[in-house]
Amino acid sequence: MRTERDQLAVTERVLERMTGQLAEERASTRPMPGQVGGRAVMLIPHREPGLEEDTLPLDYQLIITAVRQAAGPVMAREVGEVVGVDVSVKAKLEPLRSKLVRLVDRGWLRKRPDGRFTTRL
C-alpha cells in the first residue's frame, strides 16, 4: 500500500506541474492587447465558454448575425450584401473577407472547404 501511495503522490505532482505548464501555454497564445500609435487596439478574442458575442466590436457582431440568419453557408459577398458593404468593388469586399477569416481563426465561425462561412456547430 505504501508503494501505491508513493506512486499516487508522484502522479499528483506530475499532474500539478503539467496543469501549470498548460495554463502558461494557453495564456501565451491568447491575443494580447496591443497599441498602435499610442492608442489601444481592440483585438478579437478567441471564443471560450462563457464569452458572448457582445464582447466583439459591433461590425463583427453584425457579421456573425448575418451568417447566422442565412439559410445555409454563405460566401463573403452574401454577407457583404446584408451588412451594407459595396460588393461590386473588390477592394471593399476584401476587408470583409479578412474579418470573416479572423472570426474563423478565433473560433467564432467555421469556414467550409468550398469557401463558404457558417456558424460553429
Image: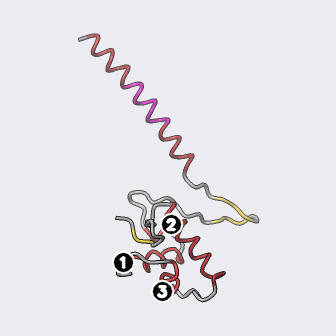
The type of residue carrying mark 2 is: Leu
Query: 112 or 67: nearer the eye?
Result: 112
Q: Nearest to the eye among marks 3 and 1: give it.
A: 1
Q: What is the span of residues highlighted in magenta in the rendered image? A: 12-21
The residue labelled by disc 1 is 72
Alpha carbons under labels 3 and 1: distance apart: 14 Å
The residue that appears at 38% across and 57% down in the rendered structure is: 49
> Residue 1 placed where, x, y %?
23, 11
The type of residue carrying mark 3 is: Val
* Mark 1 or mark 2: whose residue is earlier in sequence: 1
On residue 22, the disc is none
The residue that appears at 61% across and 76% down in the rendered structure is: 94
Q: Quadrant of the C terminus?
A: bottom left
Quarter of the image for residue 9 reads top left
The residue labelled by disc 2 is 103
Q: Secondary structure at mark 2?
A: helix
The residue labelled by disc 3 is 82
The residue that appears at 66% across and 59% down in the rendered structure is: 34
Query: 11 or 74: nearer the eye?
Result: 74
Alpha carbons under labels 3 and 2: distance apart: 17 Å
**Residue 65 higher or lower than 19, as above or below:** below
